[in-house]
Amino acid sequence: MKFPKDQIERKLRQWWQRKQSSPLRRRVADPRKTGGTVFDIQPAVSSQEVVQIMVQVERILGFKLDNSRIIKRGGYQNVEEFVSHVMPQLQNRFLKHQTVPQSTTKPVKGVIAHAR
């Protein structure tokens, strides 16, 4: 099976767009320019919010993900940062999941077997 890159990237971007277009999203100017509090410099999407989309990505990939090793702590400022960070992580997990494990038994040291 090939990594469904286009499908996952499309899903991530659509999810980000829905998050950003929500009427509940707080819209403020850059607090570094206008003054403000530490709460005004929060990421556009927090790492906790990203877990929501990872559940949908798991369905596409067909296996459970360890989100703590994929999602960047603190969240993401924009969609490009999000997609460029998450996609390689997902592809690596997919490739590791697809590989067939080699023999799980170790040969006994000093023992040689010949087939006749």
Image (cartoon, grey):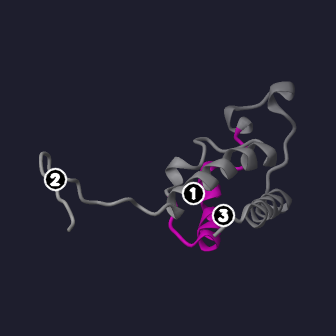
Q: Tell me where residue 65 appears, x and y as whole percent.
A: 52, 61
Q: Which residue is mark 3?
A: 53
The residue under label 2 is which amino acid type?
A: Ile
Question: SS for tag 1?
Answer: helix
Magenta residue check for 44 = yes
Using the rendered image of the protein, determine whether residue 44 is visible from the camera's viewpoint. no
Q: Nearer the viewer, mark 1 or mark 3?
A: 1
> Which residue bears the numbered disc 1?
95
User: Do tag 2 and tag 1 residues touch (Cβ < 8 Å)?
Assistant: no
At horizontal 20% and vertical 68% (from top left) the residue drawn is: 116
Is there CB contact under 8 Å for labels 1 and 3?
no
Give the magenta part as a residue range: 42-65
Chain-order first, disc 2 or disc 1: 1
Q: Position of residue 63 (x, y in %)?
A: 52, 69
Q: Position of residue 15 (x, y in %)?
A: 76, 63
Does the stretch in magenta take in 61?
A: yes
Q: Secondary structure at mark 2?
A: loop
Q: Using the rendered image of the protein, determine whether residue 51 is visible from the camera's viewpoint.
A: yes
Q: Secondary structure at mark 3?
A: helix
Q: Main secondary structure of the magenta part?
A: helix
The residue that appears at 63% across and 70% down in the rendered structure is: 1
Q: Residue furthest front?
A: 116
Mark in front: 3 vs 2: 2
Q: Earlier in the sequence, mark 3 or mark 2?
A: 3
Circle 2 residue: 112
Residue at the (74%, 50%) spot, across then down = 83
Question: Could you tell which of marks 1 and 3 lies nearer the N-terminus?
Answer: 3
Dot 1 amino acid type: Leu
- Which one is closest to the eye, mark 2 or mark 1? 2
What is the distance, in whole Å, between disc 1 and disc 3 at their CAs?
20 Å
